[in-house]
Amino acid sequence: ASSLERKLPQMKREDKAAGYTLAADIQLQLGKMEQGVAYLRQAIQLAPDRVEWRVRLVETLIAMHDWEAAEKELRLVELLQPDDRRISGLKTRISVGSGRGYESL
């Protein structure tokens, strides 16, 4: 386990969530998409109102072609921040990538 992974259990909730996003970024840069998604989900579990992290998760799921999971997470982004200007573009990416029509989202 990395130094960060060993320290995470002793950190405060907010610091731990930020640590998970840092670990996610590292894993994603290394091409370890599933581990990156797992760390993002852990961060979101600790700080469910952090829209930015949810958007990052949606973008990662789109890159992995996990359309169903991306759509589910995007719905949560829309509930938390309905006026977020990224929503429309993410919906389009999901609908085009999945081969489904935009209206189905």
Image: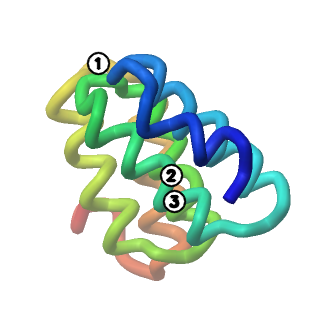
Give the residue drawn at x 25%, y 59%. Answer: 72
**Number of the label disc, if any, that sits on residue 94:** none
Give the residue drawn at x 44%, y 24%. Answer: 11
Q: Amino acid at mark 1?
A: Asp
- Residue 97 as seen in the image, left or right of residue 99: right
- Quadrant assignment for the N terminus: bottom right
- The residue singled out by tag 3 in the image is 37
Give the residue drawn at x 60%, y 57%. Answer: 36
Q: Say which of marks 2 and 1 sits in front.
A: 2
N-terminal of the pair, mark 2 or mark 1, is 2
Helix, strand, or loop for circle 3? helix
Please determine whether, in this image, residue 15 is positioned above or below residue 9: above
Helix, strand, or loop for circle 2? helix
- Distance from disc 3 to disc 1, alpha carbons, whole Å, reads 25 Å
Q: Amino acid at mark 3?
A: Val
Mark 1: give few (<14), some (14-19) or many (20+) Cα within 10 Å. few
Q: Amino acid at mark 2?
A: Tyr
x, y (%) of residue 97? Answer: 54, 73
- The residue singled out by tag 2 in the image is 39
- The residue singled out by tag 1 in the image is 83
Residue extending furthest toward the right: 30
Please determine whether, in this image, residue 63 is positioned above or below residue 29: below
